[in-house]
Amino acid sequence: MNIITALAISIGALAAVATYLCLGTTFGLQVWALFIGWGSFYHSGGGTDGLTKSAINHVWGVAVAAVTLFVVGTVGGTTVVTSIIIGISVVVLVLGAHSTMLNTIPAGVYGYASTAAFSLLSGVAIGDVAAMGNAASIVLISLILGNIFGFVSEKIAGAMSTKTA
C-alpha cells in the first residue's frame, strides 16, 4: 500500500489508543497536548532525529512557560506588566535557538503554548510552585508521549507501505 494510506491506518489506530490512554485512565494526560506532540514529531522531520529535536525543544518550551507563569502569578500587576513579562520570556525562548539542541523553535513554541493554555484554562494557581510544576509535568509528559506515538506510527506505516524502486 502507499505511504499515505499506511500512515492513515497506523495513525488512526494509534490515535484510538492514545485517546483511551488520556481519557480512559486516571493519569491526567491531555489528549490535545499528545496530538500536538505527535504533529511536532512529524513537523520536526520524523525519525529518531525528529523525535529527539521535538522532545528536547518541548522541554525547553514547557520550562520557559512554567517559569514565566510563576513570575506572572507572583508579581501580579497590570495587563501591561504581564505583557512585558511574556514578551521577555518569548525572547528567551527564541534565543535558546543559538544552541543547536534548542534550534527547533516551533517545537519550543508548542511546549510553551501548551503549558500556558493548560495552566490558564484549567485554573492552575500559577503563583504556586507545586501547582505550576504539576501542570508543566502533565503537559510535558503528554507532549513527549505524542512524540513517541509519532515515532511508532511512522515505523508501523513504513512497515506497511510498499517499497518501490
Image: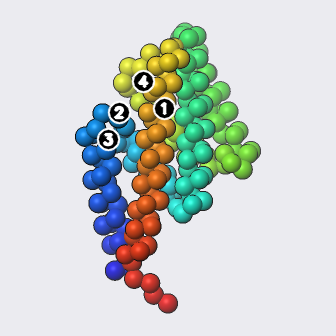
Single out the residue that lies furthest toward the left.
24
Q: Look at the numbered disc 1 and give the secondary structure of its residue.
A: helix
Few, some or many C-alpha atoms within 10 Å of disc 2 (few <14, some 14-19, many ≥20)?
A: some
The disc placed on residue 62 is none
Label 3 near label 1: C-beta < 8 Å? no
Q: Nearer the viewer, residue 112 or 88?
A: 112
**Disc 2 element:** loop
Instruction: State the residue at coordinates (29%, 60%).
Output: 13
User: Residues under labels 1 and 3: Cα distance?
Assistant: 14 Å
**Label 1 crowding class (10 Å Cα cut-off): few <14, some 14-19, many 20+?**
some
User: Helix or strand or loop: what does disc 3 sit on?
Assistant: helix
Amino acid at circle 4: Leu
Disc 4/disc 2 C-alpha distance (Å): 16 Å
Q: Which residue is mark 4?
A: 120
Q: Secondary structure at mark 4?
A: helix
- Label 2 sits on what residue type? Gly
Please provide percent x and percent y for residue 48.
57, 60
**Above/below status of 70 relative to 103:** above
**Crowd band around label 3 with a 10 angstrom C-alpha radius: few (<14), some (14–19), many (20+):** some
Colour mode of the rendering: rainbow
- Decide: marks 2, 3 in contact (CB < 8 A)? no
Q: Is residue 138 above or below residue 3?
A: above
Distance between the alpha carbons at the discs numbered 1 and 4: 15 Å
- Disc sitting over residue 22 in the figure: 3
Sequence-first tag of 4 and 3: 3
Residue 137 numbered tag: 1
Q: Tell me what residue is drawn at x 39 percent, y 82 percent.
A: 162
- Of the residues under marks 4 and 2, which one precedes in the sequence? 2
Q: Which residue is mark 2?
A: 28
The answer to whether residue 59 is above or below residue 11 is: above
